[in-house]
Image (spheres, grey):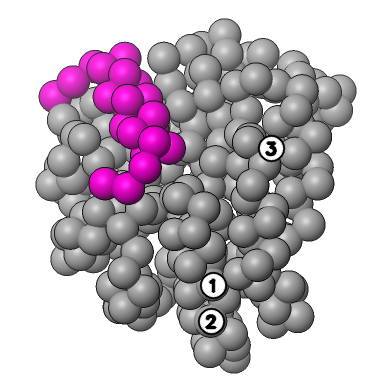
Amino acid sequence: MFVDSHCHLNLLDLTPYEGDLNQALAEARAVGVHRFMAISVDIDDHIVLGEIAAQHVDVGYSVGVHPCESPEVMQKASVDYLVQLAQAEKVWALGETGLDYYHSTEYVAEQKACFARHIEASKIVKKPVVVHTRAAKADTVDLIRAEGSNHGILHCFTEDLDTAKAVLDCGYYISFSGIVSFKNAQALRDVAAYVPLDRLLIETDSPYLAPMPFRGKSNEPKYVPHVAQALATVYGRTAEEIGEITTRNFEQLLQGSA
């Protein structure tokens, strides 16, 4: 059994399914994916994701704003509003939030402030925060530490060993996407080998970053077992064992702080 801990269900390419998300989820379930966390990018994504989650017992979602959104959108994510949205039972996490200096360094202060508000809301509602970082690893770690955040995921991990150790020391889980399966990602697999099995998660980040052998194609939740297989090679386990371990870890994540 597998959990896709990070997927954008409202952004999937549903052309192969004649626009029917139910079919895409059915195909994922057929290969053993039994839980899906649908991730918000825009503060208003909670509307459609809440509707999807209401129709599927195995789907939960997050609420929050991606750091690549405009300052105007980030400003909407006040602590009070995030806490209000996060009261819904099917909201499993806050985010995705974090820092992204790859796409722009124009609004660094706004990104940091928004990230901090997500962390504060996460503490209030006792639900994990989903963190995105790109070209901003030092500031990301510094802010996690400064805000005393110990209940979260560094998702789609592509950073170095020092970053992994730092967020693990803060109590975070580390989630790997299809990138870990890429032929040129041996350095990332080497870092993955240092991540304790009890802090490991898997995701698709679909529709992005499809794992091998589907690299370059639109990603979807049914491919998460391929991420497990790539990590199985790293840990000397089977993909099924990685699935069981990461499922337990996901349940632990949702239960409370590390």
Residue 123 part of the magenta-drawn span: no
- Mark 1 and mark 2: Cα distance apart in space: 6 Å
Q: Residue 165, relative to residue 182: is it above or below?
A: below
At 49% from the left and 59% from the top, the residue drawn is 124
Q: Quadrant of the N terminus?
A: top left
Residue to which mark 1 is pinned: 117
Q: Residue 83, relative to residue 71: is it above or below?
A: above
| Left or right: 250 in relation to 197 | right
CA neighbours of label 2 inside 10 A, class few (<14), some (14 to 19), many (20+) = some
Q: Decide whether the magenta segment is chiefly helix, strand or loop.
A: helix
Between residues 40 and 233, which one lies in front from this camera angle?
40
> In the rendered structure, are the residues bearing label 3 and label 2 in contact, judged by CB atoms less than 8 Å apart?
no
Magenta stretch: give its range. 236-258
The dot on residue 113 is 2
The dot on residue 226 is none
At 18% from the left and 20% from the top, the residue drawn is 237
Label 3 secondary element = loop
Label 2 secondary element = helix
Residue to which mark 3 is pinned: 9
- Mark 3 and mark 1: Cα distance apart in space: 25 Å
Between residues 190 and 62, which one lies in front from this camera angle?
62
Residue 242 part of the magenta-drawn span: yes
- In the rendered image, residue 84, in percent from the top left (x then y), is placed at 68, 56
- In the rendered image, residue 216, in percent from the top left (x then y), is placed at 57, 43
State which mark lies toward you, 3 or 1.
1
At 75% from the left and 28% from the top, the residue drawn is 54
> In the rendered structure, are the residues bearing label 1 and label 2 in contact, judged by CB atoms less than 8 Å apart?
yes
Label 1 secondary element = helix
Q: Earlier in the sequence, mark 3 or mark 1?
A: 3
Between residues 212 and 224, which one lies in front from this camera angle?
224
